[in-house]
Amino acid sequence: MRLKSQIMPRICSLILALLAGTLCYAAEQKLVFNLSTEPKSLDPHKANGVPEAHVILNLLEGLTRTDAQGNAVPAMAEKWDVSPDGRTYTFTLRKANWSNGEPVTADDFVYGWRHCLEPSTAGEYAYQLFFVEGAEDYNAGKSKDPATIGVKALAPDKLEVKLKAPTPFFPSVLAHYAYSPLKQSYVEAHPKWASTPEEYMVNGPFRMAEWKHADRLILKKNPAYYNAANVKLEEIVMPMITNESTGLMQFESGHIDYTEYIPLPDIPRLQKDARYTTAPYMGVYYVAFNNTRKPFDDARVRKAFALAVNRQQLVSAVLRAGQIPALAMVPPGITIEGGDFRKTTGDYFKEDVAEAKRLLAEAGYPGGKSFPKVKYLFNDMEMHRIIGQALQNMWLVNLGVKVDLDVQEWKVFLQNRKSLNYQMCRAGWIGDYLDPITFLDMFQTSAGNNDVGYKNPAYDKLIGEIQHSADGAKRLQLLRDAEKQIIGTDMVVAPLYFYIRQWVKKPSVQGIVSNPLGMVYFDKVTIGD
Amino acid sequence: MLARIGRRVAFSLATLLVIATATFFLMHSIPGGPFSSERSLPPSVEANILRRYKLDQPVWRQFADYMAGLAKLDLGPSFTSDARTTNDIIKDGFPKSALLGATAFLIAFGIGVPLGVAAALRRARLTDRMLMMASVLGVSAPSFIIASLLQYVFSYRWQIAPAAGWGESPWQVVLPAVALAGFPVAFVARLVRSSMLQVLDEDYVRTARAKGLPPSGVFFRHALRNAMLPAVTYAGPLLAALLTGSFVVEDIFSIPGLGKFFVSSINDRDYTVIMGVTLFYSALLIGFNVVVDVLYAIIDPRMAVAD
């Protein structure tokens, strides 16, 4: 009897423990996410690139973050006011702490942004801050006085930001990690903080637990995060599997839960799989024409080439992942003045083989006769190659023009494209923020990314007006005028399709928030059964 | 003997110097730089980056700085990693690649030599024919085919080994090492077989047999020792190549080794890492060749006499 009374409670508690154990195990809050490559840096002001963003955005939080559509939502800033001229923002910070217990203050933003712009930091993304008054001059070393940067702490919880020009999309720009705050006293005392997991101070939902270079990163929940009570995920393991086939195999054999890197040949098979998803991405793929050289210095020839491509066939038969045919430069998904810019604006041209032939004849090449020898240049990647072959075939059949394909190594390709040493080549552009201007301002005469040699003073003026316009309705009209000029009128490039994102994910993983800018947030993730 | 080694070491250092100079100027002559990308940077941002990495200096100046660092064995910062220097990259990656490479090397000699000997002793019989056929397969199948095949069978069909990663399971060493060993096993077997056949026809082997030495004595003391010479010659460069890793195998099995940097550093124009891995590999290669020379003298006393 005595024995029984001793044993029974023990057995009961053992059963309970086992039960609890299995329950906990069944819902272990751990996510395995393929990061693909080793981040170049995890210092928010030196880093650039996709894997870096996936890590930093979950460690550090700026004034805003973005939702699933890419629109700004409050983060460290609780709310903000904008001056009538659209150039001064006043942010009210929420009560939040760094992982070492110190409060996040307005001074941390002033210091962080200055650190980003410091010439000696030499960060690639310093230019993300160039919307701020005085930022570019400070970064260029034209001003040595950090007080000339338009960011000021009015009070520990009040931050004032002065902009160069009215920038209606500024709150969404702020979600970029280049705008991360840093605690000056801490950073100066720990110069290697950004490369040492145990020193990496965070104010976001997760902290860095382990960094095995070129192998894996492990993040763990940050208990000091202001919203920690609502973060269910305890751990994120990020193996760096660069080889896409290996990554997919690791997913299919259950070793990883989520990967965005999927080999081209596997897409048709995966489309029948419920774990595969695609979503819009803020990017456009296009054919760049060298506007300065014959035969593509003639808008009629450029149009003929653009109109002779069957984009639906290209995306459904060649790429096969649900990309969206593009008859304009700005992708869908940008809300402006209450409507989707692409939907409310419409397209600027139609595919039309007869019209393409007519234009080519008008330019002096009837039926493609006496058309000079031209080459289509692309960098050495399977996808670009098959697109090049499809285009080559369409131009031959529809225009009677025989185009040669020319492949180059990536950096050689870039150099040739930059120096206009090509006739036609592939190009792609990913938007930095949700506003049409990010797809339009690169065609200004002096823009560093004007790789097509387009020179049009009227267009430059139009872009200048957009950049200084505080009137939403007028600005929208100007944006449409600008896009119409480069596509509808001049066809400086031939848009082909709008990008998509794609991933495979275990059904048990819920709540990953990602958006068309490619930002991925893990704080709302739960792992079900 | 010591003088010979001393001469070799001095000569080796001179060779390294030539390699460093040639590599430096060759890589600077390839178009594109470490910071060019789809999106060009605003001039001020680009100027800051070039200044930070001293790429704004004339090339001869960069070369002088690099050589001064090299003299102190400082291989410089990596342009693609803020958290690690080139020295760190080699320090982190080499032990992993070396473990795989050493395993593959042991497989290559541990299996290749007995197979070659077996084939030679059973010349023109079924064993010989089967082995030589298999070796043609091994010599001609590239490592990525073997790697993918192993991955498919062990990780995907049977699911007994992880397809990728490092440090969690012995399979993560075994599969890539087998993939790496495919070619050398077959090559060593063929080398040993042909030199064994040659040696078995030599007069001194016949003499040894005629003296009435037991077959095992003839075989081990006289035949095998001489038949190993070509295989030992091959062992030096093979070991250097295997220890420094393979891009293809490390990429497929996602191994944080050194091998992938031989390709990625060039794609990225990561100048300091290109220099670092090239010199590291060269130093190993030259070092092992010196060792092989010494081994020659031990295996074949005629070499030492000739010296």
Image (tube, coloured by chain):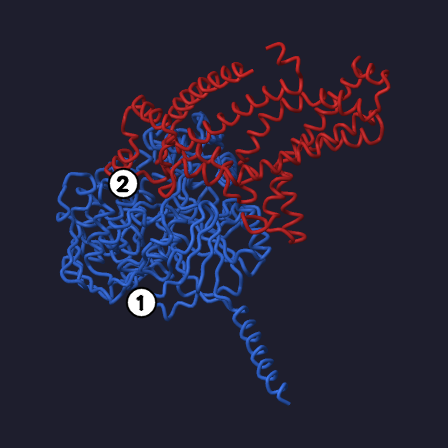
- Residue B57 in the image: state x and y as whole percent: 27, 27
**Precedes in sequence: disc 2 or disc 1:** 2
Q: Secondary structure at mark 2?
A: loop
Report the residue marked by disc 2: A122
Residue type, label 1: Tyr
Query: Of B30 and B182, which appears nearest the observer?
Result: B182
Going 38% across and 46% down the picture, which residue do you hit? A49
Query: Of B302 and B276, which appears nearest the observer?
Result: B302
Going 61% across and 83% down the picture, which residue do you hit? A7
Chain identifier, blue in the render:
A
Report the residue marked by disc 1: A226
- Residue B165 in the image: state x and y as whole percent: 54, 48
Q: What quarter of the picture does the C terminus of chain A occupy?
A: bottom right
Chain identifier, red in the render:
B
Going 37% across and 39% down the picture, which residue do you hit? B38
* Contact, mark 2 vs mark 1 (Cβ under 8 Å): no
Q: Chain of mark 1?
A: A
Question: Can residue B87 be seen from the camera position used here?
Answer: yes
Query: Do pointers 2 and 1 mark residues of a single chain?
Result: yes
Left or right, residue B187 beside residue A310: right
Question: Can residue A416 be seen from the camera position used here?
Answer: no
Query: Of A148 and A379, which appears nearest the observer?
Result: A148
Residue type, label 2: Ala
